[in-house]
Each structure stands twice: as structure tokens, then as C-alpha cells.
Image: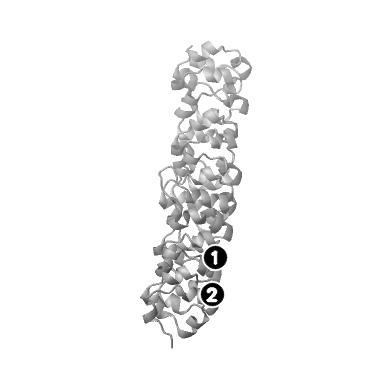
């Protein structure tokens, strides 16, 4: 009688006495003869002794019967060589995978996970997932990871998410769970651009600050955020998340998308950091909403970036915030846009800043 025929007749009480050496000498045919009943009697050490080339011949039915105590005996090579069908047969025990075993899963294995199976991974196993594995995860798999598990992803794993997967993480709680190092994992501008307003808001101040910092590719990602996302930012996110150090990274279109409330709540050092293209893009409505302090915070050398229409609609209260240096740096066109009532509302200190090119163009009467 052939060895495989004998093995198929052994019961679980008998298979437990097979030595590791005997297990290692089994042929593919022998291993294939191991059924559910025989497998139940094998220890993790016995399973680990089976050669990889032979282990992968075990039936899906037998693999589905593995106990949690047996999973630990599988080598990373065993795990890596399993077919997707074999891996799926084991998903009932996916929560028992060690870090090294999880890291050995193929992209095909990862992509086969549904939301329930992905949610069964342990936090340490999730932390062991590589960028290539994450790239294979389905939207259901990403959603299945949930808030707790998402927070355990490495930065490189987060960076491997496609724009579709980024948007699949629709729960604001999930984005709130991401750490700064993970947000820096968004390696491409197309990923950052895929973020919704709710996701951006959920990142909080620290998260946005991380997004504004140069990532692994040296790219500042806030310039890729949608105008809707910018308009949804809170005061702390604008002041502390982006702040004076990164406000210049925003495009003119993004600055123009800010609400008057947002602009009014910016600290003076942030407003003073706005650049020529950004100030030129600010709408007349936005300028009209600035306080006198906000207007006075615009950098002296940037005041000329405002349009004549912006200047013409400044209220007398706003004009009181204008410094003499700012007045001196106004363009001739801006000076000509000031009405006589606006000029009359300005203090002597302010008007002393006007220069010889501006004075002849002003509407004194």
C-alpha cells in the first residue's frame, strides 16, 4: 500500500505522533492525502515542517479546518505560496496571523479580502502590510479596516492607496484616526486632490500641517486640495495647520475660495505672508470683509497687488487700518481709485505716506 494511502487512513489521534522529520519527507502526493480529520491532529510544529512545495497541495477543505493554534506553525513561505482560493479557505483564522505572516500575503490575497475579513486583521498585522499589498486592497477592504486598524497603517502603505481607495475611506472618523506620518504617506497630488471636504476637516490641525509639509517626494500637497476643501477648513487648520509658513503654497484660486469669515479669522502673520498672485486673486467681496487689522496686516510690498476695485470699495473703518508704508506702496491706479470721502477719512499719519506720483492722480474733490 502506498504511503499516501496509509496516511489517508490515519485518524487525528495517530497523526499527532508523526515526527517533524517524517512530515518534512512527505511528498506532494502524501500531503495531498491529508484530509480534514488527519490535519486536525497535527501541531503547528508538524505543519511548519512540511516543505512549501508540498504544503500548497493541501485541499481548501482541510485548510478551512485549521485551528488557531495551528496557524502559527505556517511559515511565511507557506503563506506566500498559497493560492487565493486556499487563502480564502483560511480567512476564518485571519485574526491569528502573525505580523510576518501578514506581510507574506500576496497582492491577490489582500485584494480577495472583503470588509468583514479585513476587519478581522489584528492591528499589528495591519501595521506589517506593505505598500504593494495595500495597492491590492479593494474599497471594501479599506472600509473594513475601520478607524482602529487604519491608524496602524505605515506611511508607505497609506501612500500606496489609489485615489479610488482614498475616497473609499469616506468616514471622517477614519481620517481623524490617521497620524501625521501617515498623512505624509500621501505621496501623490492626485491622492490629496481626491480628499473630500469631510475628510480634510477630519484630519484636524496636525493632519493638515502634515499635508502642508514636504512629503517623501519633496512635494507640498495643499496646493492640490480642492477649493471646496479649502473653504471648509476651520480657523485652527488655517492658522496652525497651514500657517504663515505654508500659506504661500496655496494657489490664487484656493485663496479666492476662502470665505470672508476665514480671512477675517487669520492671524496677522498669516495675512502678511500672502503673496502677489494670491492677493491679486482675492475677490472684491473678500476684501470687503476684511477688518481694519486684516487690511493693515497685508505686507507693505504686496499692497499694490489689490485691484483698483478692491481699493475703491474699502470702508472708512477698513482704511483706518492702512499704514503709511502701505499707502506709500499703493500703485497710481489704486490711489486714483480712492474717493474723496475715503481720503477724508484717513489720518494725517496715513496721508503723509503718499508719494509724488500718487498725489496728482487722487480724487481730492
As measured in the structure, the alpha-carbon distance from the residue carrying label 2 to the one carrying label 1 is 21 Å
User: Along the line of sight, which residue is nearer the eye, 106 or 56?
Assistant: 106
Mark 2 touches mark 1? (CB < 8 Å): no
Above or below — where is 107 with respect to 190? above
Q: Is 131 left, or right, of 149 in this rendering?
A: left
Image spot of residue 266 (x, y percent) = 55, 62
Percent position of residue 159, x then y = 46, 44
Q: Residues within 10 Å of mark 2 (few under 14, many from 20)?
A: some
Could you say which quadrant of the image residue 45 lies in? Answer: top right
Query: What residue does disc 1 label?
Result: 262
Q: Circle 1: is it few (<14), some (14-19), or many (20+) Cα within 10 Å?
A: many
Above or below residue 176? Residue 89 is: above
Outermost right residue: 13
Residue at x-position 42% and y-position 77%: 309
2 or 1: tag closer to the N-terminus: 1
Residue drawn at x 60%, y 18% as measured from the top left: 11
**Exactly how many numbered labels are in the figure?**
2
Query: Which residue is more in the foreground, 138 or 47?
Result: 138
Please provide percent x and percent y for residue 46. 56, 17
Which residue is at a point 54% across and 53% down the rendered structure image?
241
- The answer to whether residue 112 shows anywhere in this view is no
Q: Position of residue 69 (x, y in %)?
A: 62, 25
Element type where label 1 sits in the image: helix
Q: Which residue is mark 2?
A: 320
Residue reaching furthest to the bottom: 365
Is label 2 or label 1 in front?
Answer: 2
State the mark number for residue 347.
none
Q: From the viewer's side, name the closer residue of 22 and 275.
A: 275
In terms of secondary structure, where does tag 2 sit?
loop
Looking at the picture, the colour scheme in use is one colour
Position of 194 compared to 67: left or right? left
User: Can I make out residue 318 in this image?
Assistant: yes
Amino acid at each position: 500500500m502506498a504511503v499516501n494511502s496509509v496516511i489517508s487512513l490515519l485518524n487525528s489521534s495517530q497523526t499527532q505522533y508523526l515526527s517533524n522529520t517524517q512530515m518534512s519527507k512527505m511528498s506532494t502526493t502524501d500531503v495531498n492525502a491529508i484530509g480534514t480529520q488527519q490535519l486536525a491532529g497535527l501541531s503547528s510544529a508538524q505543519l511548519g515542517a512540511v516543505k512549501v512545495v508540498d504544503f500548497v497541495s493541501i485541499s481548501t477543505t482541510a485548510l478551512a479546518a485549521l485551528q488557531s493554534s495551528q496557524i502559527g506553525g505556517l511559515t511565511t513561505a507557506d503563506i506566500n505560496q498559497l493560492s487565493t482560493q486556499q487563502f480564502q479557505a483560511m480567512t476564518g483564522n485571519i485574526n491569528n496571523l502573525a505580523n510576518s505572516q501578514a506581510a507574506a500575503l500576496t497582492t491577490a490575497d489582500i485584494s480577495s479580502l472583503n470588509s468583514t475579513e479585513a476587519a478581522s486583521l489584528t492591528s499589528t498585522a495591519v501595521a506589517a502590510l506593505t505598500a504593494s499589498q495595500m495597492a491590492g486592497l479593494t474599497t471594501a477592504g479599506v472600509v473594513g479596516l475601520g478607524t482602529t486598524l487604519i491608524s496602524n497603517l505605515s506611511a508607505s502603505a497609506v501612500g500606496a492607496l489609489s485615489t479610488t481607495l482614498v475616497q473609499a475611506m469616506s468616514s471622517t472618523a477614519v481620517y481623524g484616526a490617521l497620524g501625521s506620518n501617515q498623512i505624509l504617506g500621501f505621496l501623490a497630488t492626485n491622492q490629496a486632490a481626491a480628499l473630500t471636504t469631510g475628510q480634510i476637516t477630519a484630519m484636524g490641525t496636525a493632519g493638515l500641517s502634515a499635508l502642508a509639509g514636504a512629503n517623501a517626494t519633496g512635494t507640498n500637497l495643499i496646493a492640490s486640495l480642492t477649493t471646496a476643501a479649502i473653504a471648509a477648513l476651520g480657523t485652527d487648520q488655517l492658522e496652525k495647520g497651514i500657517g504663515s509658513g505654508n500659506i504661500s503654497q496655496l494657489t490664487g484660486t484656493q485663496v479666492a475660495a476662502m470665505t470672508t469669515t476665514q480671512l477675517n479669522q487669520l492671524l496677522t502673520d498669516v495675512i502678511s505672508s500672502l503673496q502677489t498672485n494670491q492677493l491679486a486673486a482675492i475677490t472684491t467681496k473678500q476684501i470687503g470683509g476684511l477688518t481694519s487689522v486684516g487690511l493693515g496686516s497685508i505686507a507693505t510690498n504686496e499692497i499694490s497687488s489689490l485691484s483698483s476695485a478692491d481699493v475703491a470699495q474699502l470702508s472708512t473703518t477698513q482704511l483706518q487700518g492702512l499704514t503709511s508704508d502701505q499707502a506709500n506702496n499703493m500703485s497710481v491706479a489704486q490711489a486714483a481709485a480712492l474717493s474723496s470721502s475715503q481720503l477724508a477719512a484717513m489720518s494725517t499719519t496715513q496721508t503723509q505716506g503718499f508719494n509724488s506720483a500718487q498725489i496728482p492722480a487722487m480724487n481730492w474733490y
